[in-house]
Image: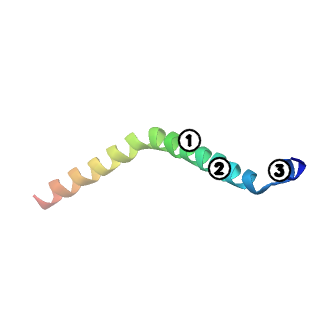
Amino acid sequence: MLRFLRDEEGLTTVEYALLMALLVVAAIGVWTTFGGKVKESVSASTNAFSNTLG
């Protein structure tokens, strides 16, 4: 039983899972914050090119 409690191999998996969850939450936060601004910027660029080309 003590050998099972001292085994740290399972902790590595949990740590990676927590790190991945943190990255996903951060990515969602960035997407919601900047997603609309990027869409507006791309749309404005597309309109500018369309107006320039005729």
Q: Earlier in the sequence, mark 2 or mark 3?
A: 3
Label 1, residues with CA under 10 Å away: few <14, some 14-19, many ≥20: few
Residue 26, quarter of picture: top right
- Residue in front for this viewpoint, 11 or 22: 11
Q: Position of residue 48 (x, y in %)?
A: 23, 53
Task: Give the alpha-carbon distance from disc 2 to disc 3, as whole Å.
Answer: 24 Å
Query: Which SS class for mark 3?
Result: helix
Residue 12, numbered circle: none
Q: Which of disc 1 and disc 2 is earlier in sequence?
A: 2
Determine the CA span between mark 3 and mark 1.
Answer: 32 Å
Give the crowd class for mark 2: few <14, some 14-19, many >=20 residues within 10 Å: few
Residue 27 image offset from top left, x and y in percent: 52, 46
> Which label was assigned to residue 4?
3
| Precedes in sequence: disc 3 or disc 1 | 3
Mark 2 highlights which residue? 19
Q: Nearer the viewer, mark 2 or mark 1?
A: 2
